[in-house]
Amino acid sequence: MSELFTSDNPVPALTVTSQPSTLSGTPLSQTNPDDHPLVFQRRGKGFVGFGELIRAEFSGPGRFTQARVWWNELVARATVADGVNRPGSGLMVFGAFTFADVSAQTSVFIVPERVIGVDDAGTFETVITGENLLSDAPPTGPSGSEAPSRGWEEGSVTKEVFLELVGRAKQAISDHGLHKVVIARDLVTDVGSSFSPRPVLEHLAESYPDTYVFCVDGLFGASPETLASVRGKSITLRVLAGSAARGAHPEEDRSAAEALA
């Protein structure tokens, strides 16, 4: 069951229980090929969530503030029995937020019904329940792993448009009107009505174990970076991208590249 949060729908009181588990393996290994899990995993450690107990959506320039207010109220009303007391135990939420204030997509927080966490100390399981939650919400996703019905096709940025954008960006840089730009092309495919991201996630985790494999509400991928990881009073950043101005000769380029590394 799932409840969609709105301003007219009060935040429910949840009961949360975390206990050590005898399960072994990675978070993704706890799922089935047809599952639509919530995932955050790196090097076989992380979390996987099952079900959608509560769904909260936010939009516009105030989406982060809305989410913080909602989360603080949810935490304040929750009754938590944490028999693990490790990062990620207790009440857990998975989120995906839009980059732009004007995005047509909504930002989302999803509280799962069950979470399995894996860290260096072992595996634990969290069960989350609540009273008076809606039970007639649509399912969170189809089942099955149907193969794509066609190959990749060009999206909104065709090859011709991409080359035009590169030319415009180069001219803007020459005119000193632009200092840094990322130009990307989108590819589109039809994955079928019963597509499950789980096999793709497993492949990403095996092929790129140092990345953070994630999946929230249909948004999934693998990222080598972490914006910020907060553990107690410690903040850890994992930032790999960088840029430097070209030098006057190859030796200067090599020196700048080494400095970035």
Image (cartoon, rainbow, N blue to C red):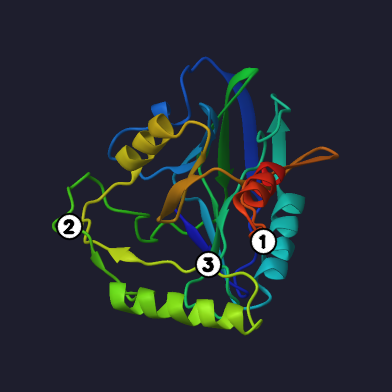
Q: Nearer the viewer, mark 1 or mark 3?
A: 1
Q: Which quadrant holds residue 108?
A: bottom right
Q: Secondary structure at mark 2?
A: loop
Q: Which residue is mark 1?
A: 245
Q: Position of residue 150 (x, y in %)?
A: 14, 58
Residue type at mark 2: give it. Gly
Q: Residue furthest right?
A: 233
Instruction: Give above or below for 156 relative to 5.
Output: below
Is 207 left or right of 6, judged from the image as shown? left
Is 189 left or right of 169, judged from the image as shown? left
Q: Nearer the viewer, mark 3 or mark 2?
A: 3
Q: Secondary structure at mark 3?
A: loop
Is 247 left or right of 155, judged from the image as shown? right
Residue neighbourhood size for the residue with mark 1, other residues' Cα within 10 Å, grouped as few (<14), some (14–19), many (≥20): few
232 or 163, which lies in front? 163
Please say whether residue 35 is visible from this viewpoint. no
Q: Which is nearer the N-term, disc 1 or disc 2?
A: 2
Gap in Å between the C-alphas at discs 1 and 2?
Answer: 38 Å
Q: Secondary structure at mark 1?
A: loop
13 or 92, which lies in front? 92
- Write the residue at 52% across / 14% down: 22
Q: Which residue is mark 2?
A: 151
Residue type at mark 1: give it. Ala
- Write the residue at 51% across / 78% down: 169
Residue neighbourhood size for the residue with mark 2, other residues' Cα within 10 Å, grouped as few (<14), some (14–19), many (≥20): few
Residue type at mark 3: give it. Val
Gap in Å between the C-alphas at discs 1 and 3?
Answer: 15 Å
